[in-house]
Image (cartoon, rainbow, N blue to C red):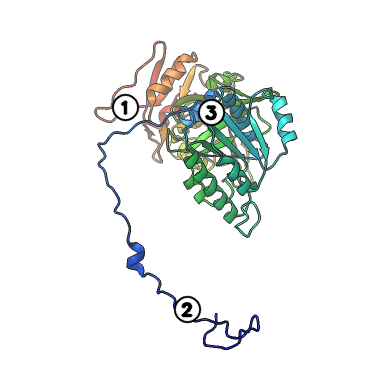
Amino acid sequence: MHPRWAGRCESCGEWNTILEETVAPRPGPAAKGAGRPVDFVHLDGSAELPPRCPTGIVELDRVLGGGLVPASAILVGGDPGIGKSTLLLQAAAALARTGRRVLYISGEESIEQTRLRARRLGVQDTPLELAAAINLRDIAASLRTPGDTALVVIDSIQTMWLDSIDSAPGTVAQVRACSFELIQLAKAGRFAVVLVGHVTKDGAIAGPRVLEHMVDAVLYFEGDRGHQFRILRGVKNRFGATDEIGVFEMTDRGLAEVANPSALFLAERHGNIAGSAVFAGVEGTRPVLVEVQALLSPNPAGQPRRSVIGWDGGRLPMLLAVLEARGGLRLSATDVYLNVAGGLRVSEPAADLAVAAALVSAATETPTNAGMIYFGEIGLSGEVRQVTQVDARLKEAAKLGFVQATLPRRIARGNRPPVQPNGLELTEIGHISDLVGAFPRE
């Protein structure tokens, strides 16, 4: 461009080659905003449930809400080595056995490494299609080909690279752009796409936070690599319930489903030891019984230690203060260690009563009743508050052979009494002092 007329071009050195051109003015904001009106409809119109495609792994289908939904995007996160790739390879192979086309694209492992893992899992004979690639343009060209693809697994999204973005793979810009392209391809091709995501040291999925808003479902794979249990938890699901869990057991042949996690979590429980109580919890729509263990150690000098595994560490000091102020226990000069056995992380406030029972049992050195369960929320004034899904908790306890249940007292008018299963005796308490008084003290 030249700001004024010139006889000779400064770039090529030729004469009389510069021509004047009239540039049309750009459209203003009014012209930009012109478009077609949006059609609005009423809420009472017809709506069909999305079709489901079962993966063949019942625990995974439970967390997804019944199976994969076509044209959906799922984000799976978890610590390194927890079993994300193992679970998805098993699910992809199980779905491929049904005759559907399933693609597994790895950006971290070669095809030979994936084949070795498939041979260890016993799924090497399935018609699963593998590829090792990180260039998103090459992957997009392959996914645009017509076909009846049902599922595409991208392992992992942090390894994908788009050449139009001037940054390295795994950066915020690359993860955002690659995820957007893959989700658009899934919507256009009517196939489900699963994105494997790395996590940071804080446990959150690495990359932009908007990534979790872009996808339809976010699943976290939890557990300790030194423990055999793995928990698949759904924290977001546009097509199903949130906070649903699937329980797996890591074996030498991969991940095995656990149909009855309560029985497995309580398999090694000894009911004659002080400091142990059984909590009847609910994860999503599934009732789960776990053992809460407490250990107290005198610490007359220095700052008492509070160590928690599997429960909210900030809630333990509050509960200890309530037990001391409202229940009369002296725990201020005592080290407290709390553990939820089995590797499950409990987050609901209904676990307060079970934790308090384990603490009182440890403080009085009196074992809890081996056939009793506990659930209920405890307030700062020591009151035991109502919780949800009481019937489901009691039914699960009766199914596993428990004969007694300690739960909050019904005080609200019109509160429907819980359905008492046969052979289960209910003990209702309204204050933390009632729980403390049930244990003999010197």
Q: Nearer the viewer, residue 421 or 331?
A: 421
Q: Amino acid at mark 2?
A: Glu
Q: Residues within 10 Å of mark 2 (few under 14, many from 20)?
A: few
Q: What residue is pinned by disc 3?
A: 60
Residue at the spot x=44%, y=32% of the render?
A: 350
In the rendered structure, find residue 21 and report the number of the disc placed on it: 2
Residue at the spot x=59%, y=44% of the render?
A: 141
- Cβ–Cβ under 8 Å for marks 2 and 1: no
Give the x, y percent position of residue 159: 65, 47
Relative to 422, 247 lies left or right: right
- Cβ–Cβ under 8 Å for marks 3 and 1: no
Q: What residue is pinned by disc 1?
A: 410
Q: Does residue 306 lie above or below 435 as drawn?
A: below
Residue at the spot x=60%, y=57% of the render?
A: 164
N-term mark: 3 or 1: 3
N-term mark: 2 or 1: 2
Q: Residues within 10 Å of mark 3 (few under 14, many from 20)?
A: many
As helix, strand or loop, the secondary structure at mark 3 comes to helix
Relative to 245, 427 lies left or right: left
Foreground tag (3 vs 2): 2
